[in-house]
Image (cartoon, rainbow, N blue to C red):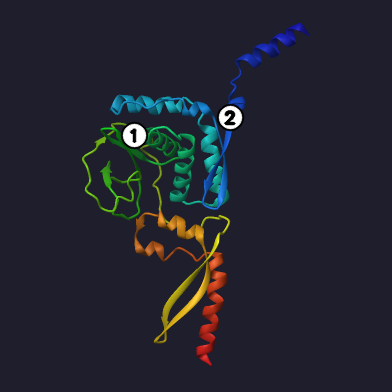
Amino acid sequence: MRCLFSFLLITASVLPGYAQEYQELRVPYYSESVRITYSPGFLSPGKPALDDRSLYQHFQALGKTDYTPLLRSLKQARKIFQLNDWMYYQLMRKTLDELFAGRSAVEKELAAWFLLSQAGYDTRLAYLEEEAFLYVYTQDAVFEAPVIEDNGRLFVNLTNIRARGGKQRALYLLNFQANPKGNAFSFKLAELPLLRPRETSMTVRFRFRGQWRQLEVAADQNIRDYMAEYPLIDESQYLDIPLSPTLSASLLPQLHQLAKDKSV
């Protein structure tokens, strides 16, 4: 019995204590409150100097932390809410804003770079003075956003994606590719996220058979909010975005009735 007790004691002392270190937080995400599990050790690496060697070492230091609970939580939320790449990245950024509250913008940017790379995307990191910039490989047309080309691939600047065509600065591109065979990042929104709707009223005006018509409809405030933050993509992709269930239930019956009245 004494030998068994000693074995259990020794085993308990050498097993990793990750499960005891995990913490949780709630991240506001439009109409949802997303539960995120993480290890505080992921926050341990401090802000590095902005040079190739220090940034590479910082990436390696993050890789030695127990980052998997955080990444797993983000992936689970992505599946539950059926988020596309951009909406998933937005959740990631909102989570990092909570985790790194009071920390530097550089640390948040480097954490996003690390997590997006670990999530399977081909990323690049650029820097200048006291700023870091996250780039990701995409095959989509994104307008008025800074882009670079590397190894025959086009990378869009997620950090300044809404720069709206401002003058691009000459940045230092980190000589390190975290996931060079990674996936392309897509901005296509073929399906709306499964977020609890926040109903709001709006007025729709349009011309129908030579006359102006006005309809009062119900819309989902979530969509208005996240589309206001959406990058400027090819107009053909906007046509693929479906109506929300809230708007469909309010607008379509009125359109059907209008068409019916005019056919009489």
Report the front residue among 169 and 98.
Answer: 98
Q: Is residue 191 visible?
A: no
- For numbered disc 2, what is the local secondary structure? loop
- Percent x, y of residue 74: 52, 41
Give whichever of discs 1 and 2 has the lower sequence position. Answer: 2
Which residue lies at the image location 47% right of the left edge and 42% below the top edge? 92
Residue that extends furthest to the top in the rendered view of this protein? 2
Res. 193 mark: none
- Percent x, y of residue 20: 62, 25
Q: Is residue 231 left or right of residue 2?
A: left
Res. 177 mark: 1
Tell me: residue 94, above or below residue 201: above
Which residue lies at the image location 48% right of the left edge and 45% below the top edge? 91
Residue that extends furthest to the right in the rendered view of this protein? 1
Nearer to us: label 1 or label 2: 2
Quarter of the image for residue 117 reads top left
Res. 22 mark: 2
- What quarter of the picture does the N terminus occupy? top right
Tell me: residue 124, above or below residue 260: above
Q: Label 1 sits on what residue type?
A: Gln
Q: Is residue 167 left or right of residue 82?
A: left
- Whether residues under marks 1 and 2 lie with C-beta atoms below 8 angstroms apart, the answer is no
Label 2 neighbour load within 10 Å: few <14, some 14-19, many 20+? some
- For numbered disc 1, what is the local secondary structure? loop
Q: Is residue 8 left or right of residue 132?
A: right
Tell me: residue 38, above or below residue 184: above
Which residue lies at the image location 61% right of the left edge and 18% below the top edge? 15
Q: Label 2 sits on what residue type?
A: Tyr
Label 1 neighbour load within 10 Å: few <14, some 14-19, many 20+? some
